[in-house]
Amino acid sequence: MNPFVWRRGKAEKLLSLPVLEECFCACRQLPASMASSKKVVTRDEWERKLRDVKIRKEDMNRLVMNFLVTEGFVDAADKFRIESGTQPDIDLATITDRMEVKKAVQSGNVQEAIEKINDLNPTILDTNPQLYFHLQQQKLIELIRVGKINEALEFAQEELAPRGEENQAFLEEIEKTVALLVFEDVKNCPYGELLDVSQRLKTASEVNAAILTSQSHEKDPKLPSLLKMLIWTQNQLHEKAAYPRISNFSTAALEDPAI
């Protein structure tokens, strides 16, 4: 079974924001005395409200497909397309190309990534100077990582310094990156995190978002945003009422209200 296919019961619980909104609005209207003691919503009452919320399977499927396409799970997206009949809004072949660019950045092969981006769409870097700068900055970081100090200094002077003269934010980033050369042990450098894998991932994520935008696709998946909204709404409701809430989002199990 495709691991990305949600069980309907879990999805309905996770996506039942109308129930949360309804109860939250109702609790906001409670008298102060009742609000201070919190309204109690029993499990039976809550589950009855959940059953009353109608969520179309097609909508849930589109959310899953949106996540798979945006995050680049091309094989899973193709299998999900076959199993659910949900059509992606972009050609799945373009996902492979996008993931090759992302993989190149994550591996530190920045020049390869730049060439692949230009093969995909030359206008991406032409119209996004910040992205191009961050790729060049990442290239400098990779030179420093492998100890090519002279090459790094030359690259910083010829490629990055002119951009720093035009943009104060770029200049500050250049100074932080070049500071890595001052310390024999980068662990003592206040900007040593630039050499962490997380910096590669950050740059790769920015590249991924830019390519998606060029393809008229959302740069961020919708599902995480919905989960954040659910968490926020639960926290707001918790201030007014005791109700069966979801703490473990992998199981979407309801917890009995604490009275």
Image (cartoon, rainbow, N blue to C red):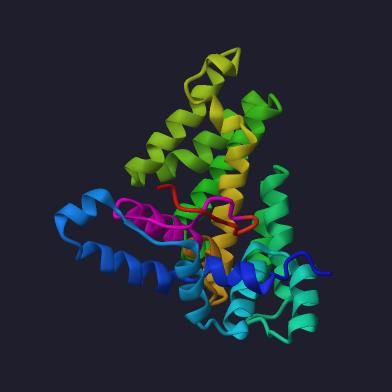
Q: Residue furthest right?
A: 1
Name which quarter of the figure residue 212 lies in.
bottom right
Compared to residue 28, the image places residue 16 above or below, namely: below
Residue drawn 36% across and 42% down?
169
**Residue 257 at what x, y percent from top left?**
45, 52
**Residue 31 at what x, y percent from top left?**
16, 60
Residue drawn 58% across and 18% down?
186
**Residue 80 at what x, y percent from top left?**
76, 76
Is residue 214 rendered to the left or right of residue 239? right
For the magenta stretch, what is the residue range? 227-249
Residue drawn 38% across and 35% down?
172
**Residue 40 at what x, y percent from top left?**
36, 58
Split into 4 quadrants, where in the image is the N terminus? Answer: bottom right
Name which quarter of the figure residue 91 lies in.
bottom right
In depth, the one of 83 and 52 nearer the eye is: 52
Q: Is residue 123 visible?
A: no
**Residue 209 located within the stretch drawn in magenta:** no
Q: Residue furthest left?
A: 32
Residue drawn 73% across and 76% down?
92
In depth, the one of 19 and 145 nearer the eye is: 19
Compared to residue 241, the image places residue 15 above or below, namely: below
Compared to residue 251, the image places residue 149 above or below, namely: above
**Residue 247 located within the stretch drawn in magenta:** yes
In depth, the one of 102 and 245 nearer the eye is: 245
Compared to residue 88, the image places residue 163 above or below, namely: above
Q: How many marks?
A: 0
Is residue 19 rendered to the left or right of residue 4? left
Q: Is residue 207 visible?
A: yes
In depth, the one of 161 and 127 nearer the eye is: 127
